[in-house]
Image: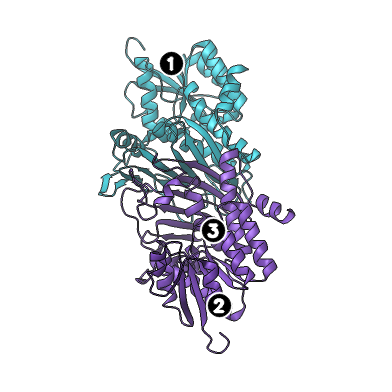
Chain colours: A cyan, B purple
Amino acid sequence: DPVTGVFRGVIAGCGYFSRHHLEAWRRIEGVEITATCDSDPARARAAGLAAYTSADQMLEKERPHFLDLVTRPETHLELIRTAASRGVAVICQKPLAPVWGEAVEILRIARSAGIRLMAHENWRWQPWYREAARLIRQGAIGQPHAYCLRMRHHEGRGDDPFPAQPYFRDMPRFLVYEILIHHLDTARFLFGEIETVCAELARLNPAMRGEDRAVITVRHQSGLTGVIDGHTLHPSASGVALGDAWFEGGNGRLALDPNGNLWTERGCVWRNDVAAGYRGDSVRAAQAHFIECLRSGAPFETDIEEYLRSMAAMEACYLSAERKAIVSPLKFLVDSQSE
Amino acid sequence: DPVTGVFRGVIAGCGYFSRHHLEAWRRIEGVEITATCDSDPARARAAGLAAYTSADQMLEKERPHFLDLVTRPETHLELIRTAASRGVAVICQKPLAPVWGEAVEILRIARSAGIRLMAHENWRWQPWYREAARLIRQGAIGQPHAYCLRMRHHEGRGDDPFPAQPYFRDMPRFLVYEILIHHLDTARFLFGEIETVCAELARLNPAMRGEDRAVITVRHQSGLTGVIDGHTLHPSASGVALGDAWFEGGNGRLALDPNGNLWTERGCVWRNDVAAGYRGDSVRAAQAHFIECLRSGAPFETDIEEYLRSMAAMEACYLSAERKAIVSPLKFLVDSQSE
């Protein structure tokens, strides 16, 4: 609001993850969430704010500055169309869209309506990755030679995997689409654009429909090669970093442990003491960035157009596994330009 | 010898690595090395045994039971032809041959002469891998889900890489051909046949002609996927294991540290206290296996025909990088059968 400086927002989708959004919004200054919306009226009311079952009605009545979209990916295109028609800025949870064509359509809608649209991608906002990026750019490891982001989750085990998000079981594309896109985006954040990916995908737990094991080899435009290695059958509960990572360069090595601490050969160089929020308070950091950029006019790190590069890398992984080939994400980006 | 039970051997090639062979032979009971041969007479004499500059003359005069071939790969085919014509068993250092066609030709020669021929592949004989294999087969980690063999060497740094083996610098194919074939073979030893590989290769040090960085994704016939990740620009001296490794399964995790110790979540489960010989005395173990099988008639673990599968995986890595494709080693094996 130009007078009060407060951004009024509304939330569409009141499932498992939206509680993290709401909790984080409440700790960001200059933001007021006025309403929530869900097709299930009881869930819509749970936050104790104005409750709607129709996003269109919510936007009509609340006249917010922004829409926080936490619904399932299948609904994003239509809801963004609605928000765009009203000139409302959107912060949209990932996956942005279930198929590539819809993501491109979302970009077009946002562009032609002139609304601002940021992908709610919290992974790169985890403080250990911010600090790792700072150290690497400072030259702490020298020229990067190799890296690995290793994702481990334990809830994919057994006959009833992912009890908090049981729809994970029925997704035709699971691990890369739902989870490792975080790591592809973080790899871009740390090391720049991705030139090619090669993916080996497998389904280890027969109770899952989609893949729950992936090894992705990444080649960056800089020439750097790294690995994103994930599965969801870890025998024990995973730490806050949902796995670990290492980054190697000509002068040294930086390692992330599962608890979010960073190490070099000399010992611990960054201790994770973030207790608040989700995974290093990364949801709050992503949302604070959204508000800061709305206020300043600066570009979002994960502006829709920018984030399409991470999505293209994700799509390239599936194409790689299908065609048994090393695939460039550019294939998707160029196709989307020429359509 | 049928009377004394002693196997008399001769060594061809007196370069850097043959000293490890000779030292190991001296600690194997029932073996006598009678002569060494090198094109450089001074090197041939260095061992203090009968010295030759011609392998043919050495075989003619010494009439050994076996030839230990430690010459450069380019010479293996002709020397094996010579040994085969005299019915002499051969233990041959890797790389077996500089190109795939020569390896297949070597197999044919050995088969048609009926001589026994073992690839001198020490990596899988490192005691930490023997113990890891035993633990994994015992069910220590449950069903294997994922693994990584990470190879790190420090001698590839700077303007004069690999001072002990300077010819490494000029090899058109270096890291996979010369070093990571060990890891491909060890992966087969641990987890069975390889169905496909995908390789990203890069040259990091411009003083090298061939690649000194590789990420190889391996899919085994069992469905297991793993990673072989290597480079030779490690900032500090590497431990005896030349890197590290981890193996994950449904029930747990086993890790190899750079000093050759094995760890589970419960702590160290195998302490490397092998001080003798080369890398866990693996050269001696490979050579002792050769003698044991000569004596018993049992097949060698790395019999030429068996080892061709590891070589095919190595060749598949280069084809993968060239074609930007996921490649089956079977392509090479089938081609070699049908020729």
* Residue closest to the eye, A288 or B316: B316
- Judged left or right of residue B171, residue A171 is right
Q: How many numbered markers are drawn?
A: 3
Residue under pointer 3 = B75
Between the C-alphas of marks 2 and 3, the distance is: 21 Å
Q: Secondary structure at mark 1?
A: loop
Q: Position of residue B88 (x, y in %)?
A: 59, 73
Disc 2 vs disc 1: which is toward the camera? Answer: 2
Q: Are marks 2 and 1 in contact (CB under 8 Å)?
A: no
- Amino acid at pointer 2: Arg
Q: The disc numbered 2 marks a residue on which chain? A: B
Residue A186 falls in which quadrant of the image? Answer: top left
Q: Residue at x 45, y 35 (%)?
A: A223
Q: The disc numbered 1 marks a residue on which chain? A: A
Q: Residue at x 44, y 40 (%)?
A: B203
Q: Residue furthest bottom?
A: B3
- Judged left or right of residue B224, residue B229 is left
Q: Secondary structure at mark 3?
A: helix
**Pointers 2 and 1 within a single chain:** no
Q: Residue at x 37, y 21 (%)?
A: A291
Mark 3 Cα within 10 Å, few/some/many (few <14, many 20+)? some
Residue A209 falls in which quadrant of the image? Answer: top right
Residue under pointer 2 = B63
**Pointers 2 and 3 within a single chain:** yes
Establish if B80 lies above or below B176: below
Residue B196 in sight in this render: yes
- Amino acid at pointer 3: Thr
Q: Secondary structure at mark 2?
A: loop
Establish if A152 lies above or below B185: above
* Residue closest to the eye, A32 or B181: B181
Q: Which mark is residue A65?
A: 1
